[in-house]
Amino acid sequence: MIELRDLTIRAQDFETDVLSLAVRPGEVHALIGPSGSGKTLILETIAGLHRPHSGSILIDGKDITSSPPEARAFAYVPQDTSLFPHLSVADNISYGLRVTNREFNTELKQHIGHLSARLNISHLLERYPAKLSGGELQRVALARALAIRPRLILLDEPTSALDPAIREDTYYLFKELHRELKFTALLVTHDFEEAFFLSDVFSILIAGRIRQTGKRKEVLYHPKDASVARFLGVGNLFRGYVVEAKGDYVVLQWVEGGAVISVKRTFRDRWVAEGTDIIWGVRPEDVHIMKGEEKKGGENLFDVNLLSLYSGKNIHNLVTQTTSTGTAIRIAVRDTVLQRLGVRTGDTFQVYLNPETIIMLPQE
């Protein structure tokens, strides 16, 4: 559908790495990255608002790098929605059709009427943007984008300005519309929940470079390097030395913890060999608290002290230290689990690191 081929973009003192990316027809592809990584710049370049420094943008195999925005037949929904304040909702939605000189026939009117109904904005058609809430503005902007039946819709942080309840409703609505209209979309976001709910494929962008592209499980459970792992929430990263690598298991010497760790390896970890220095990590939610259970010693089992506890809505974040070396291990548990365990600041208990949830990464 759309392909970025060896693309580089310069803007003031920022420059991307060489970018290569392909979005297939009917796919929702998320470009995820922290603020300042170049996400919006890439999206605006695809839309034709910036000229790339080098490389090309192709749509269905045709080079459109030099084509003006109006010739690309893309729909672009920026963060601020950019609705025209002097136009009614109805006129905002039909604006793209008028600009492209599309005949405003009965079929298109029915299409817009259907979109308005699906997005629950039919009652707003005579209003102006100043009279709309943030959620209403977002839905009108999406209706305007989809009205022209674009080959590609570009979405910049599509729900960042919405309240949590409205955001969740918008996720479901977007999925329903995508299933129904089968459009192709590229969205940029720094929000994991948004990306993983809405998208089929993910590209991780860090400091202007696409570090990894893949489907949900591949990206989440098999990050390519430590920078991707950190961004995706692998809060415990340590140094290790491979003592043994045989079959499906690897034995590591944990440098900071002064202990031996057993790790289950997959076909993606065949690069790991004896004598290799690596980074290994475990997600806070994959650290298992053994308080009150029978295990008193054994593989991947460590005594820790609870230093501090930070509570969120449903998740509690615990900061612990191993009693032997003082190495920090972060743990995330749900509210019900914390209540059952009854752990408090100052407690000592054991934690277990499941060999199947440990991630191995190349040394930086």
Image (tube, rainbow, N blue to C red):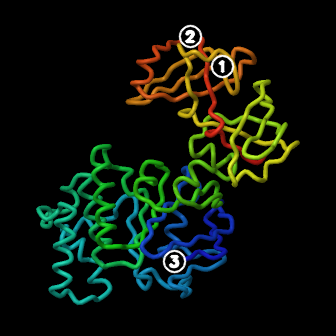
Left or right of residue 91, residue 352 in this image? right
Mark earlier in primary sequence (1, 3): 3
Residue bearing mark 2: 347
Left or right of residue 177, residue 70 in this image? right
Q: Are marks 2 and 3 in contact (CB under 8 Å)?
A: no
Nearest-to-viewer mark from 1 and 3 = 1
Picture disc at residue 2: 3
Residue bearing mark 1: 321
Q: In front here: 76 or 274?
A: 274
Q: In front here: 130 or 316?
A: 316
Q: Is 280 above or below relative to 172?
A: above
Residue 258 visible in rendering:
yes
SS under mark 1: strand
Q: Amino acid at mark 3?
A: Ile
Q: For mark 1, does the 10 Å Cα neighbourhood hold few (<14), some (14 to 19), or many (20 or more) residues? A: some
Mark earlier in primary sequence (2, 1): 1
Please provide percent x and percent y for residue 260: 78, 28
Q: Is 106 above or below relative to 323?
A: below
Q: Report which quarter residue 170 is drawn in.
A: bottom left
Q: Is 25 above or below relative to 125?
A: below
Seen at 56% across and 49% down, the residue is: 220
